[in-house]
Amino acid sequence: MGKLIICADIGWEFRVKSRIRDLAVTERPDRSRIAVMGARLKRIYDLPEEDDGYRVLVDRLWPRGISKANAQLDDWLKELAPSNELRREFHARPEKYDEFRAAYTAELSEHAEALEELRARVAAGTVTILYAAKDAEHNNARVLCEVLDVDPK
């Protein structure tokens, strides 16, 4: 049976089977939280902070180990996530990131209204774009920032 870890500050509960290192809540803030102009990229597994502003998840599937009540989301934009087919293909072949980026950008062009709404939120204040991927450099949230003309550094 997995170990139970409770973060008392906000009541997050995680069940970890064997690899504690996968629970990168505060151990990797320099890799997984990247401040950008009016937005920031952050893993959903990182603890929410007061300066997160508007918190939006941009994954199609709900991330494991996080309850909806404790995620403290303002929105979950599944329509801006990669299609299931594209998501599965990229997961199976992460070395094809450039192809994924091109295909995902094409998919995003079909959701111009949702993109404009998110772009307006970024222009109006702080938006934290949340993702579940372990790779902070090669994921759909980073491509979304490129499409929104937000330069993630």
Image: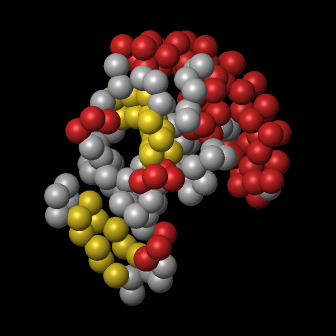
In percent of width and height, residue 71 lies at 32, 48
In percent of width and height, residue 123 lies at 42, 14
Image check: 124 left or right of 142?
left
In percent of width and height, residue 54 lies at 33, 29
Placement of 118 over or under 89, stated as above or below: above
Identify the residue at image location x=46%, y=52%. Answer: 30
Image quarter of the C terminus: top right
Front residue of this view, candidates 61 and 133:
133
Image quarter of the N terminus: bottom left
Front residue of this view, candidates 39 and 130:
39
Identify the residue at image location x=76%, y=58%. Answer: 92
Identify the residue at image location x=57%, y=27%. Answer: 151
In percent of width and height, residue 80 lies at 57, 30
Placement of 136 over or under 101, stated as above or below: below
Q: Residue furthest bottom?
A: 1
Image check: 42 left or right of 26?
right
Identify the residue at image location x=42%, y=49%. Answer: 44
Corner quadrant of residue 140: top right
Q: Is residue 16 visible?
A: yes
Image check: 111 left or right of 27?
right
